[in-house]
Image (cartoon, rainbow, N blue to C red):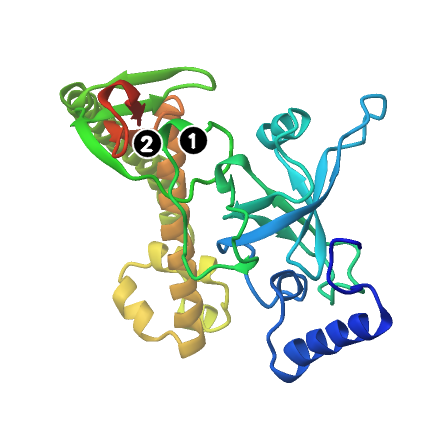
Amino acid sequence: GDMLPEPVWTLPQVVDRLWYRYHREVNLAQRPCIKRLLENDDTSARFMVLCVSGVHKADPSVTSDRDYLLLTDGWYEVRTHIDRGLSQLLHAGKLFAGLKLCLWGTEMHNPNPAGPLDNREASLTIHINGTRRATWDARLGFQAQRIFKLPLASVRSGGGKVPCVDVVIARVFPRVFRESVGKHEVLYRNERSEETERRQWEQKRQKAYAAACREVDRARQRLAQKAQHAKRPTRETLAKVSSGRELHQALLASADPSELQSVLSASQQQSLSNYMQEQRDSYAAEVAAAQNRLMQGKSVRKVTELFQMRVLDFRSTPDGKAPVS
């Protein structure tokens, strides 16, 4: 108070600042960053600068207690959950009230969007890869710049999404193929070995498909032979049949199926067409099941192509290289 030229926390000063905020938010529609997030009118993944207004360190004796920060845009604040990397920095004393942070790729949990004064359930989640210290004079809120660059050596595994890295590709490795052959077994092959394995598997699959078709055809031929020995229908009895299955059996037992089919009514032809489509679908399903059984459940290969390369940080020396694959 003694260092300021005039008192700040006086009633006229407070009312003047509140009126200024009302004029900006309501009359000019220039809402602060956090208010737009809490009202679900903007995405939390944008690049923004917020200030730490409070910190909370978890009590080790309370299992449900977690570290969190209170971040503000200068007018409103929101509770912010942090990951393990930021928790380590918090306990090391590198995150403290008054510190400005550059944030990108944050996640907003906001089940009931509302204004800052009515919303007590919303929370923000930030990760160490998308968090960096801002300069002391950085403007709070959303930034015109879309992202910020990170040194490659500062990227942490499991630290969330990375905004941007500036790298140079130093080497591109040959393609590698990874196949999952069991719950916990993985095989790696080069391009030539994968082509040989794929060709052998395709030949085995085609042989299994042909054997499955023969197996299903024999079973269906036995059923068709039984239907052919059934009593041949007359036009009078055929007029009373409406089932697609019975119509199909009548055609199989008939000496001239084409002539018998020509006397069918429109509804009978539709029933027969639907039954034939069901039979085709059933045939395909039976063949696929038989093929899968013949191949011992390996009718589909789970192969992933891996592209590997080595990159160097554009701003680093050769000693600072870091492989990324």
- Residue at 62% in and 44% down: 125
Total numbered labels: 2
The answer to whether residue 232 is visible is no
Disc on res. 155: 1
- Residue at 50% in and 63% down: 243
Q: Amino acid at mark 1?
A: Val
First in residue order: circle 2 vs circle 1: 1
Measured as percent of width and height from the top left, residue 103 is found at 53, 47
Q: CA distance from mark 2 to mark 1?
A: 57 Å
Q: Quadrant of residue 174?
A: top left
Measured as percent of width and height from the top left, residue 87 is found at 64, 29
- Residue at 62% in and 52% down: 108
Q: Quadrant of residue 24?
A: bottom right
Residue furthest to the left = 192
> Is 138 placed left or right of 290 in the picture?
right
Q: Nearer the viewer, residue 163 or 231?
A: 163
> Is 315 placed left or right of 79 in the picture?
left
Q: Is residue 236 above or below residue 37?
A: below
Q: Secondary structure at mark 1?
A: loop
Q: Quadrant of the C terminus?
A: top left
What crowding class fits label 1: few (fewer than 14 Cα within 10 Å), some (14-19), or many (20 or more)?
some
> Is 299 placed left or right of 142 in the picture?
left
